[in-house]
Each structure stands twice: as C-alpha cells, then as structure tokens.
Image: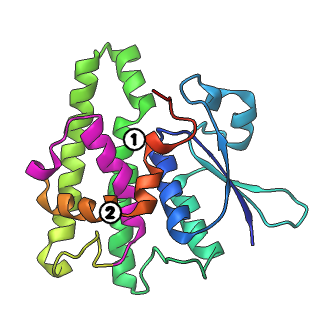
Amino acid sequence: MPQLTLYGYYKSSCTTRLRIALALKKIEYTTVYVDFFNKEHRGEAYTAINPNQSLPTLAADVGDGKGPIYIAQSVAALEYLEEAFPDSAVRLLPSNAGDRARVRSLVEIIVADLQPRQAAQTLEKLGNDLGANQDQKVRWAHDWCIKELRAYEKIVTAPAAGPVGKYSVGDSLTLADVCLVPAIQNAVERWGVDLDKDFPALAKIYGHLKALPEVQAAHWTKQPDAPKE
C-alpha cells in the first residue's frame, strides 16, 4: 500500500478534511507540520512540492523507486484515498451515481464557493489592497458563510432528497461531511455564525458529526503544532 505523508497546518480547514478522512478510514500516515503563520508554505522547499503554496499536500509513495507523488489539492487527495484504499474501514463516496453526484455538489459548495472567499490569502488581500479592517473582514467571511451554508442546507433538505438523515446524504458518512466539519467550525468559531438559529438541519447533522471521536481528534486545538496555553 502507498506510504502517505500529510503536509499540513493545525488550523488549516483543508488539512482538517484530510485528518478526518484518514482517521475514519484508519489509514496510517506521517505528518509534516508546515508553519503557515511564519509563511513556511511560501518557502522554496514547500513550493517545490506544491507550486500553489497551499495546504495541505498529500505525498503518496508506492515504493516503485520513483519517489512520492504530491497531491496538492485536498479534494483530489480525498478522492485518491477512495481509489487507492478501496478496502479501508469507511467508503466516503456512495455506490449510487445519483448520491455520488449529490455528495460532490455539496463538496463543491464548501471547497469552491465558500472556502476561497474566507481563506487567509483572500482576507489578507482585502486588507492589503482594499484597506479592509478586521471588522470588515469578519463581516465579509460571515456573510459568505451564511450564503453558502444556506445553499448547502437547501440541498440537504430538498424534498427530492428524501428525509434528512444523520449526515449530509442519508445515514452514511461521505466526503461532504468531511468537508462540512471544518467549514462549520470556522463559521461558528471564527465568524460568529449562529448554527442553531440559522441552520437547524445542519446543526443536527453537525451534532452527529462532532460526536465522532475521529472528528474530535481532528479539531485544530488537538494538533501537536497548535499553540499550547
């Protein structure tokens, strides 16, 4: 089986997606901590494996002597885990094509529509180029969370989708849930979204998710590179 190395940062929501998926699947891996705060991700060494300078990167070495492949986007890495470890403890893409499409649609809401608009580099550019202050940055991120999580909840609760289950698509964990967890953590902990008030269906789903030990262990406060009080 491939030997995996996860290059990540404790507070990176994209890294959290991989931590959750790897834990759910019970796949062993090694972690390399990249100091985002001190801009290590923009250094020559990390840029050599991830030219986009984004986190995380998943390195997979199949032992063929060619060295590892570097998967530089979190969703590509999540899909790789599905394909490279078909016998892992949990499958995160449904067998039904329609359900897989729903999962991927929900994933895209998080990773394509929400995440880039409240990412650190976006907020940094708002301040540097447009003069936004901290309160304005928080409002920007908050408002995008409301818009995109509302879209997510409408898909989850659409009559055509059937009764709302424990998770985003029925009662089985999927890649949508893996991506939803850190998005909600950011929305609530950083941007002041009232989940219970604004998104009752997502609040119930998140209640099931945050009870999972794999999700609890993946929280940024539990990571070895997180600041200690």
Q: How many marks?
A: 2
Amino acid type at circle 2 is Leu
Q: Quadrant of residue 49?
A: top right
For residue 7, side relative to residue 186 (left or right)? right
Amino acid type at circle 1 is Pro
Q: x, y percentage for residue 203? A: 19, 57
Residue underneath mark 1: 116
Q: x, y percentage for residue 116? A: 39, 41
Q: Nearer the viewer, mark 2 or mark 1?
A: 2
Q: Quadrant of residue 214?
A: bottom left
Q: Nearer the viewer, residue 186 or 94?
A: 186
User: Which residue is outermost to the bottom?
Assistant: 96
> What is the number of the mark on residue 209?
2
The first of marks 2 and 1 along the sequence is 1
Q: Is residue 62 above or below residue 184?
A: below
Element on which disc 1 rests: helix
Q: Is residue 77 above or below residue 11?
A: below
For residue 128, side relative to residue 145 (left or right)? right
Q: Residues within 10 Å of mark 2 (few under 14, many from 20)?
A: many
Element on which disc 2 rests: helix
Q: Quadrant of residue 175?
A: bottom left
User: Which residue is outermost to the right?
Assistant: 65
Q: Residues within 10 Å of mark 1 (few under 14, many from 20)?
A: few
Q: x, y percentage for residue 135? A: 23, 20
**Bounds of the magenta segment:** 172-198
Instruction: Determine the residue positioned at 66% across, 63% down.
Output: 28
Instruction: Determine the residue positioned at 29% across, 74% down.
Output: 169
Q: Is residue 162 above or below residue 29?
A: below
Q: Is residue 110 magenta?
A: no
Tell me the quarter of the image containing the N terminus.
Answer: bottom right
Tell me the quarter of the image containing the C terminus.
Answer: top left
For residue 94, side relative to residue 136 (left or right)? right
